[in-house]
Image: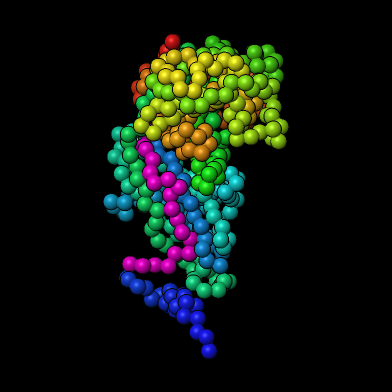
Amino acid sequence: MKINLRARYIFALLLLAATSIAWASSDQFTPVVVSPLTPGTKAFPGTDNRLHVVYELVLTNTNPTEATLQKVEVLDAADSSKVLATWQGKDLVDDLRLMINAPAGSPEIPFNQTRMLLLHLSFPTGSAVPSQIVHRITLLGGKPGPPSKTATPYTYTAARFSIGTDFPVISPPLAGKGWVALNGCCEIGTAHRSTGFPINGTFYFAQRFAIDWMKLDEAGHLLNGDEGDVHSYVDYGADVLAVADGTVVSTLNDLTDQKPGTLPDPSTITLENVDGNHIVLDLGHGVFAFYAHLQQGSVKVSVGDHVKRGQVMAKLGNTGNTSAPHLHIHLMDGPSVIGSNGIPYVIDAFEYDGQVSKAKFNASTTLAGNWGGNRLQTPNARRNEFPMDLSIIDFGTK
């Protein structure tokens, strides 16, 4: 008789786990494995007078029995009694995503499937943010062995994560008053925060901290005239500036403007043209700046050029996958515009001039009208902060 020793060994291991016998008292069977997408991030100050930490957890059900997430708690790794934030119920389901950039819609994770939990921690300015955190996972899942109709409750900690504070400091990418930070941090479901891509064998969130900048005129309008004409938009043709000294590593300059009000035919979009005419700058120390949707023929720099902070490099346009003229900008940890991870940063100096109404903006189907109703009578000076979503920012002159 031929004896399969390997099969008997694996069966013995499963039997030990099923009967709750562990190799060491600290070991625990955990049907859903949890890990951070990246090893760490930075806590950065926003214009809302809070510190922000943005990252993702990857959760995979390794057991034949369907798992149901019930709660995810973020704990201070140095003191697990300190619960920094909790996701459960609707909040948990709302921030749980499929791997195709779509809402999961439920807390269940079938066997051999993966979910991504998009997390955003917020602390009052001046708070002591832990340098390391862990996550306590509460769920219903299967025991080792064949699928079961009866799920078992589990609670365990996983996914240690590092939080630093040494983020890049840049200068403004534009000049003048009335710039609105659209699709900014850290709203889940917006065009940037929820968009990840599997590139070169790794899953990346390049646009994690991206901003789409559009400009208000003195009357609070983003456009005047025909919404389908790029020249109607207040920001069209604005000078785009280098945010730091750097070296040009990539450009595109020959795409024509997209007609505002519509997105291009998806069949025409490729990894090369999705962001339109663009510039990538190497700022050094593993930091790259990406500028997108630039006006055709306006890019004044070439690969290999060294640029200086504040240098005019191009003009704002409406090329690529865009429905209105704007400057898309983000910082990332590599030269690939989608095969890199977005990193947080702050802008060294600007004036904060209020907020565009979130309720009004989310309810509107047009960019026409007055968006400046919540501007401050006297803008206040800010230094080394990140412009949060829908903030109105006044930059200095060139």
Q: In the displayed image of the protein, which residue is found farthest to the bottom?
A: 1
Q: Residue at x 57, y 30 (%)?
A: 359
Magenta segment: does it hold 32?
yes
Q: How many marks?
A: 0
- Residue 156 location, x and y as percent? 40, 61
Q: Is residue 234 above or below residue 96?
A: above
Vertical position of residue 302 compared to residue 204: above or below: above
Q: Quadrant of residue 48?
A: top left
Q: Could you tell me if residue 369 is visible in this image?
A: no
Give the camera-side residue of 397 and 372. 397
Identify whether 375 is placed above or below 250.
above
**Dividing the picture into quarters, in which one does residue 371 lie?**
top right
Residue 46 on the magenta segment = yes
Is 396 on the left or on the right of 234, as rendered?
Answer: left
Q: Position of residue 346 (x, y in %)?
A: 39, 27
Stretch of the chain drawn in magenta: 26-47
Q: Residue at 53% x, 44% y: name it.
A: 200
Residue 225 in view of the camera: yes
Whole-percent x, y for residue 142 in the image: 51, 68
Residue at left offset 49%, top offset 72%: 144
Q: Quadrant of the C terminus?
A: top left
Q: Tell me: 27 left or right of 183.
A: left
Residue found at x 43% / y 23%: 247
Location of residue 315 by image quarter: top right
- Please say which color scheme the image uses: rainbow
Q: Position of residue 118 (x, y in %)?
A: 49, 45
